[in-house]
Amino acid sequence: MAYVVGVDFGTLSGRAVVVSTDDGTILGGAVHPYPHGVLDRELPATRTSPASPLPPDWALQVPADYVEVLKNAVPKAVAESGVAPGDVVGIATDFTACTVLPTRADGTPLCELPDLASRPHSYVKLWKHHAAQGQAERINAVAAERGEPWLARYGGRISSEWQFAKALQVFEEDPDMYARTERWIEAADWIVWQLCGRETRNACTAGYKGIHQDGGYPSPAFLEALAPGFGGFVADKVAHPLLPLGARAGGLTERAAAWTGLPPGTAVAVGNVDAHVTAPAARAIDPGQLLAVMGTSTCHVMNGDRLVEVPGMCGAVLGGIVPGVWGYEAGQSGVGDIFGWFVTNGVPPAYHERAAAEGTDLHELLSRLGDGTAVGAHGLVALDWHGGNRSVLVDHELSGVIVGLTTATRPEEIYRALLEATAFGTRTIIDAFVARGVPVDEVVVAGGLLKNAVLMQIYADVTGRPLSVIDSAQGPALGAAMHAAVAAGAHPDIAAASAAMGRVLRHVYRPDPDRQVAYDELYREYRLLHDHFGRGANEVMHRLRALRRQAVTA
């Protein structure tokens, strides 16, 4: 029997699992939190400089934290599994995206150079770094003006979360840092570089986050039109042959073998993205199956047998999820983050005391208290834009709204409205697919939020579709392990690995007809707010963002 290791690099920690290639059984696992977490308020102090504040909308990370996951979580997972290291035939990773960093030609992150450690642009820009919105708007405007053919593949708008906007921000705000950047690389590819000792690039992140379509990136002429001197960005810092998902990137180096405790030469799979790698783990790779990976944010991915350009999507990429078919991506920038924000900042002490007395957490308590009442009884409707809007508006200057508050409104009612808002956001995405002829027959859910049964039933009622759930608490890590199995030759392709190792419980939640009708009415109110603030002439959210930046800078 052969075994593989999957490593999931999330927003706050990395998780490693040891998996049987026969049936996907997880035999051992371990989690290692990133020592530095997310840097969204200040840079850490160095030996030569004190901690320094960061502007609004920044989100950075320290790449050495990712290596700590390899050194800690992988050996612990192998030890817990009882599997002999020599029986592990492959290792694969997945990452949040677009999480991108500048390095030297040998892969050394620029933030690890002593003279650059105090400069923000030398660090990893996490997926939720939204400070490049101005650059994203210029990319969209110039692309539309020039009639760039690739723009429609991304629903007509490139996000501030993606590679080009973030790189253009570095170019304009720290030209010296840009000049010293020899490679601009997704963390998904950088961690594979650390494992096998050579640079590789994967088709998934290049397609969805790097505007790689039909065999190429945006032209030097387009890049030069964005900003004089930026025309060589792709050729100088990005260009590299792409490998399909499940391909073998190389073998573990001696150094990486010492980190992980696995034998040198163990097969290393090409990099991948957390949501996309989860699709085969949840057996959600057939057309009509939309996978929602629900955590701090939600990423929606699905396959199709033909190319359809859907407004507001994050991308349509050939081979982006499974080689040989078109993969679609959409998403919501804030979901679990919104629930966490409210629980941290909006719940009175009495609720904390009750949760402690009942031996539960605030999320469970608020979900239960808000459940059982008639749909709409709270008199509220909210917009799920606390982290901006990824799909279908692709605008991270937008912000959250709650309408209908009174002095009688209770915390559980606000919490319920926020749960519903995220479901409405997912329905908006589904409606966009269906309107363009891409069927969505089933929603499959993975991620940490599926444990909230109240939330899952809301999603079934709001979307009017049955919800299936992945039968694993470690979806991304399991999906990564499947790609390790393909890279090591244990399965011929990812479809075969999915059939053998994937796990799903079908139609666990079904829509309640009466609640579905009631939610249709509330959803209409959501769409009125959605279009008023997101598509109309009301620019109040953008003006407030500008005032905030002005005040913080002053």
Image (spheres, rainbow, N blue to C red):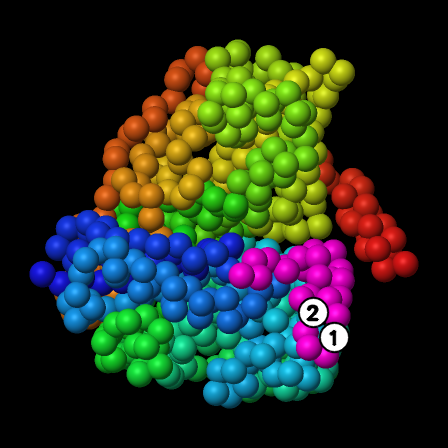
- Residue highlighted by disc 1: 49
Asked if 443 appears above or below 301 in the picture, the reply is above
Q: Is 49 a magenta residue?
A: yes
Determine the secondary structure under disc 2.
loop
Residue 45, numbered label: 2
Viewer-proximal residue among 294 and 133: 294
What residue do we see at 17% from left, 71% from top? Answer: 86
Is 103 situated left or right of 132 in this image?
Answer: left
Asked if 532 appears above or below 142 in the picture, the reply is above
Viewer-proximal residue among 240 and 112: 112
Q: Is 539 a magenta residue?
A: no
- Quadrant assignment, res 90: bottom left
Number of residues whose C-alpha sits closer than 10 Å to that of mark 2, classed few (under 14), some (14–19) or many (20 or more): few
State how far apart marks 2 and 1 are (Cα). Answer: 6 Å
What residue do we see at 61% from left, 71% from top? Answer: 123
| Image quarter hosting the N terminus | bottom left
Is 455 situated left or right of 544 in this image?
Answer: left
Tell me whether circle 2 and circle 1 mark residues in contact (CB < 8 Å): yes
Magenta region: which residues? 35-59
What residue do we see at 29% from left, 30% from top? Answer: 507
- Quadrant assignment, res 119: bottom right
Viewer-proximal residue among 214 and 455: 455
Magenta: main secondary structure equals loop
Where is residue 456? Give x, y as percent. Answer: 42, 29
Is 388 situated left or right of 477 in this image?
Answer: right
Viewer-proximal residue among 378 and 252: 252
Report the amino acid beneath label 1.
Ser
The answer to whether residue 99 is visible is yes
What residue do we see at 82% from left, 50% from top? Answer: 548
Where is residue 481? Give x, y as percent. Answer: 27, 59
